[in-house]
Structures are given as structure tokens and as C-alpha cells.
């Protein structure tokens, strides 16, 4: 279903050079509808440059891109009418309350009838969990609350695409958690394209990730694939009891790629690599509990995105495209 509609964002060889600095080198990208697309890279990787190009705020040196099928150079006004944007450092009037700020934004950007504005403002305050703080001046707001207000602002006119530039970068863990929660909620309304240099954030909310370094794309794919690297999906299994029969059963499954076995005291430990994660999810645990063993641990191996990041940035070949 994901690929049945044209991509929201598509870039072909998109390049930007600033007086000798190659900020972006021939970027090819596709962002599908209703994805939460994480655009990950260290400082100076070219993330903000890409966002500015997509919004038509700067012009490409070479290559092309479209948003909703419209050209970023010739149709940027039409594109911007359908995009909500949260810049890296949003500015607010400190003396205004959250409600006044959203009202002010809605007066400019909300295309519905005037009398619907208050209802939309209330809806936005609820969405970003600021309803109870709506009437406090912004000078009393925390960094996380400001970012959530910024997301509400960007979302006020029901955009078809929300572009967030480092929405959680400057926040403490709690502030980040709240912002990420808001982003997850938004996926049912819109496509979210956001940049970050924080690996953990991407792991928590994105479904597709691109890794950019020094203006070049170094890896892309669904988060699961990037995290799994070359190993594929692996299950960790710990068992007690006579495990030979169960081992043979598991080994004979067509979706099992291999099993690394070990022994800790009276416990057998297996790492089961699977070639069909859905079949494994449906059948592996059932197979194990059917045998004469006691299953003491069963989980899917978690990968750290940092591992992937280091691999691709520091020259490992596994997930480099
Ligand atoms: P950060 O997370 O630090 O914002 P970024 O990934 O968003 O980084 P960009 O802001 O896109 O990176 O910058 C990419 C490169 O382009 C950097 O080397 C930067 O110094 C350079 N650059 C950006 N804007 C300009 C400009 N107007 N003039 C010259 N160089 C620029």
C-alpha cells in the first residue's frame, strides 16, 4: 500500500554548492505518504540545506526535486501552501500565550472559516498536550513546550507534509520524549519529514531513515533493515532442558538462516537468524514451547543505530549504498 501513491518528496541528483562548499552532493531521495521520515546526520551534513531547498528558500546548483509532484524551483509557493515547517530555532513573542500565538498563526495560515479558528486552536493545543498551559505567557515555557507549540503552529492548516528541522535537538530527555510522542501522533494526519543528529530519536519514532554525511547520502532504508545490518533479524533464545530435539525442529524451518548456539551453566543460548521475520514472529515461539524445554528468555535482538551510523560513516561497507 505504501508505494501505491506517488512519493510526497522525490529528489534527483539534488546538489547545492555555496561558494566552493559542497553542502549537498547529488541527493536521491523518496519520501512516501504518511511515513515518519528521519533525516539523520552530524552537524554540517547538509540537512538544513536540503530542507531549505525543498521549501524553495534556496535554489539548487544542480539536480531537481518535487514535493507533491510539484517542482521545488517553479512551484514553491504552491508547495509551501501545503507544508507545515518548524525551523531549527523558532522565534516566539515571549509576552504572548500559547493560545494567542496559535490564534495569530491561524489568522494568517488557517484556510477554514474565521469562526472555526477557535476550535482549531483548541484542537492543536490538545494535540500537543498544551491545553492546560494555553493561557500562560511563553516566557514561562520550557524548551520542550516551545517545540511542541512550534509543531502545533506548523500543523495549524492541516498540512500534507510537516517538515521539522531538529525538533528535539536542544531538549532534555523528558522534553524530547514529549516531542517525539507528538510526532508519533501526527502520522495519522500527515507525512512527517524531520532532521536530527540524535540516533535514539530516530530509533524511537521513524519508520524510514536516511543517513547523510558531508552532503552525501550514506545509507537509506526502513529502520529495521538499517538496524539489522548484514545479519538480518535475529532472535535471542535461552532454554533449559534437553534441547536437541527442539534445535532440530527449528533448524529445519525454511525461514531459519542459521543458529549460533552456546551454553551457560544449565542454560542453552541460541541466536536464531531468520530470513522471513513474519514467519518467525508467528511460529518460532510456538515451536519452542511445543518441545520438552523450558524457555527462559525469548526476544528479538535490538540493534543500536549508533552501530549502523559508525559503520557507514567510518567506512564499514555493510549498509553503505
Ligand atoms: P546542523 O545540524 O549543524 O544544522 P546541517 O546538516 O543542517 O547541520 P547544513 O546547515 O545544511 O548542515 O550545512 C551543510 C554545509 O553547508 C556546512 O558545511 C555549512 O557550513 C555549509 N553552509 C550552509 N549554509 C551556508 C551558506 N549560506 N554559505 C556557505 N556555506 C553554507
Image (tube, rainbow, N blue to C red):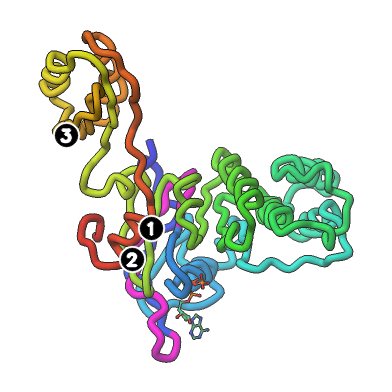
**Magenta includes 28?**
yes
Instruction: State whether residue 81 appears in this view.
Output: no
Q: Nearer the viewer, mark 3 or mark 1?
A: 3
Label 2: element kind: strand
Residue 210 circle label: 1
Q: Nearer the viewer, mark 2 or mark 3?
A: 3
Q: Nearer the viewer, residue 295 or 31?
A: 295
**Magenta includes 265?**
no
Label 3: element kind: strand
User: Dot 3: few (<14), some (14–19), or many (≥20) neighbours within 10 Å?
Assistant: few
Please indicate whether residue 32 sits to the left or right of residue 232 in the image.
right
Q: Are marks 2 and 3 in contact (CB under 8 Å)?
A: no
Instruction: State whether residue 258 appears in this view.
Output: yes
Residue 12 circle label: none
| Residue identified by numbered label 2 | 217
Label 1: element kind: strand
| Residue identified by numbered label 3 | 260
Which range is magenta? 18-38
Whether the residue carrying mark 1 lies under 8 Å from ligand 1 is answered with: no
Which residue sits at x=20%, y=29%? 263
Whole-percent x and y of residue 293? 24, 13
Whole-percent x and y of residue 30? 37, 55
Amino acid at each position: 500500500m505504501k508505494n501505491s501513491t506517488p512519493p510526497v518528496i522525490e529528489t534527483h541528483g539534488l546538489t547545492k554548492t555555496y561558494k566552493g562548499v559542497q553542502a549537498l552532493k547529488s541527493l536521491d531521495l523518496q519520501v512516501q505518504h504518511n511515513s515518519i521520515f528521519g533525516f539523520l546526520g552530524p552537524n554540517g551534513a547538509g540537512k538544513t540545506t536540503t530542507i531549505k531547498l525543498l521549501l524553495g528558500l534556496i535554489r539548487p546548483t544542480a539536480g531537481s526535486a518535487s514535493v507533491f509532484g510539484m517542482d521545488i524551483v517553479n512551484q514553491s509557493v504552491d508547495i509551501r501552501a501545503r507544508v507545515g515547517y518548524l525551523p531549527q530555532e523558532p522565534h516566539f513573542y515571549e509576552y504572548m500565550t500559547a493560545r494567542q500565538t496559535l490564534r495569530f498563526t491561524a489568522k494568517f495560515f488557517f484556510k477554514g472559516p474565521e469562526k472555526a479558528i477557535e476550535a482549531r486552536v483548541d484542537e492543536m493545543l490538545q494535540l500537543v498536550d498544551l491545553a492546560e498551559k494555553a493561557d500562560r505567557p511563553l516566557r514561562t515555557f520550557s524548551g520542550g513546550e516551545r517545540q511542541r507549540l512550534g509543531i502545533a503552529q506548523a500543523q495549524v492548516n492541516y498540512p500534507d507534509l510537516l517538515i521539522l528541522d531538529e525538533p528535539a535537538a536542544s531538549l532534555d530527555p523528558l522534553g524530547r520524549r514529549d516531542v517525539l510522542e507528538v510526532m508519533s501522533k501526527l502520522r495519522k494526519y500527515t507525512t512527517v519529514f524531520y532532521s536530527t543528529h540524535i540516533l535514539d530519536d530516530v530509533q524511537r519514532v521513524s519508520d524510514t531513515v536516511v543517513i547523510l554525511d558531508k552532503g552525501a547520502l550514506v545509507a537509506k532504508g526502513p529502520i529495521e533493515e538499517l538496524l539489522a545490518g548484514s545479519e538480518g533479524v535475529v532472535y535471542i533464545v535461552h532454554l533449559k532442558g534437553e534441547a536437541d530435539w527442539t534445535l532440530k525442529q527449528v533448524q529445519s524451518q525454511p525461514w531459519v538462516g542459521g543458529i549460533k548456539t552456546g551454553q551457560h551453566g544449565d542454560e542453552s543460548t541460541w541466536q536464531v537468524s531468520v530470513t522471513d521475520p513474519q514467519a518467525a514472529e508467528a511460529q518460532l515461539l510456538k515451536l519452542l514451547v511445543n518441545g520438552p524445554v523450558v524457555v527462559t528468555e525469548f526476544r528479538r535482538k535490538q540493534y543500536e543505530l549508533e552501530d549502523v551510523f559508525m559503520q557507514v560513516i567510518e567506512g564499514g561497507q555493510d549498509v553503505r549504498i
